[in-house]
Image: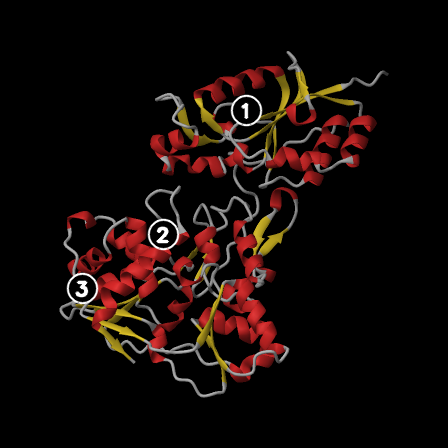
Amino acid sequence: MTKTKLVVGIYSLAGCEGCRHEILNLGEELLKLLKEYDIEIAYEPLLGFTSEREEYDIVFVEGAVASKEDIEKLKEIRRKAKILIALGSCSLLGGIPGLMKDVGKEGAERVYGGKVPVGEVVEGEPITKYVKVDYWLRGCPINKWEFLSLVKKIAEGKWFRQGERRFEFCREYLVNIKGKILYLDAEKCIICGRCIGVCRELGVYAIGTINRGINIAISTPFQEPFENTTCILCGLCAAYCPVGAINYRSDIGNVQKLLASETKPIAYIEFEALAALAEAENVHPGKIITALRDLGFDKVIVWSPLSELKLSHELNIVPASEAEYKYVNQFYPELRKYLVRPPPIRLGYRSVLITQCVARKLHGEYVLTTRELQTMLSKLDLESYKPSKPDQVIAPRIYGFVKAVGPYEVKGILEAVKRGLIKAGTIVLYICPDGCIMGGGQPYSKSPFEVCVECRKRMLETVEKLFLETVHVK
């Protein structure tokens, strides 16, 4: 019996083409597969094969549907293919292109240089919405070894039904992680790996991937709560997650109850939080102060936790928050003798802290991140407010201290202390990349194309110039 050659096509819709590159990364293993099973890749532009066929045995489709043109192209591919396989998270679930609904027509026109015809764009939808998919490979990108396994099974005639569920795109294995501050909702997770990347950049390694193939998932070691791992609760994983799969405890409800009570609370807002919110909303920082009073706060105080700082050693390592404190304790235990406790949060009864730092939620149930405050302000017309000044400004006056900003500077200066190169002085640690101005609890800018670190830094300088004239120095 003569073995029939299998003809394969690999197509892309809206996506980064990372899954296709992962297939090419198989190198010799891919060539071996093609030779052993007499497989011809007839269409794959990355390999230089651009002559389309009228019929394919197998077609892989990467990317989501993002235009009416994609819909027609996809239907034509389905007509030609005996077997259609969704390649990666974008084709199966919508993936990153599925976020187009949050960008809208204006954002799409900016991406495509104003050449997107009105009504031609759809919102990054999975191919399963328009055509029947026979098999799928999950992941962002896919697991290349699972690709090999699937092609081998099809080539050997080992037909099987994948999933055995009513909806083919349902996840088969969920890993939900609950914690006191951070939590992971696996149903939302698209395995993009951004959370793993930022955690690795910090040198913390509290999260990673587990399992293989369609059961691949993001998890902490042994599915432990975040606080039981090396996690420092910086919240950057939540800030970097594009789909809200990782998030932190919301204190909005608790604060709203305070605001509805007879005795109105006092708002303490950190300098970096005020600056970032003003930049994100593109308003004068004084308008944020006015809006806080309109929400129901009795007083608004611009405050720095370093105003509570008390130094006692010749060499002082000062963590800007509990995140840096946990970092030093876990990764540089020999430096604990120089470590100053994070500045205590002594804000008084019925006070609410508004902060850029997720780790400050360890201090109580009335701690709002700047992003949470942004949510509370979303129904207010900030532009209509007149700027006002805070009731009080409390800032530290510390001379001669050194700032270590970002994971590389923090690690570098701690290594220098460890090796005895630094023996005196005061060092303040800011573990988040670019410091507190880009902390894990900071807000999103109105336009996703204009998140500008330098813009926020300039706004911080503006806040300091505006309000430090009324400062109460400690």
Residue under pointer 2: 455
Q: Height in image: 473 above or below 168?
A: below
Q: Quadrant of the C terminus?
A: bottom left
- 2 vs 393, nearest the viewer: 393
Which residue: 39% across, 53% down?
A: 454
First in residue order: circle 2 vs circle 1: 1
| Spatial separation of the CA atoms under disc 3 and disc 1 | 60 Å
Residue 339 appears in the picture as rendered: yes
- 356 vs 60, nearest the viewer: 356
Left or right of residue 308: residue 332 = right
Amino acid at dot 1: Lys
Indicate the position of residue 470 as horizontal and vertical percent values.
20, 71
Which residue: 54% across, 42% down?
A: 171
Indicate the position of residue 122 as horizontal and vertical percent values.
41, 27
| Spatial separation of the CA atoms under disc 2 and disc 1 | 47 Å
Residue under pointer 3: 389
Q: Height in image: 138 above or below 456?
A: above
Indicate the position of residue 257 as horizontal and vertical percent values.
22, 63
Query: Comparing marks 3 and 2, which lies closer to the viewer?
Result: 2
Amino acid at dot 3: Lys
First in residue order: circle 3 vs circle 2: 3
Residue 218 is tagged as: none
Residue 132 is tagged as: 1
Extreme residue in the front direction: 400
| Spatial separation of the CA atoms under disc 3 and disc 2 | 22 Å
Q: Quadrant of residue 204?
A: bottom right
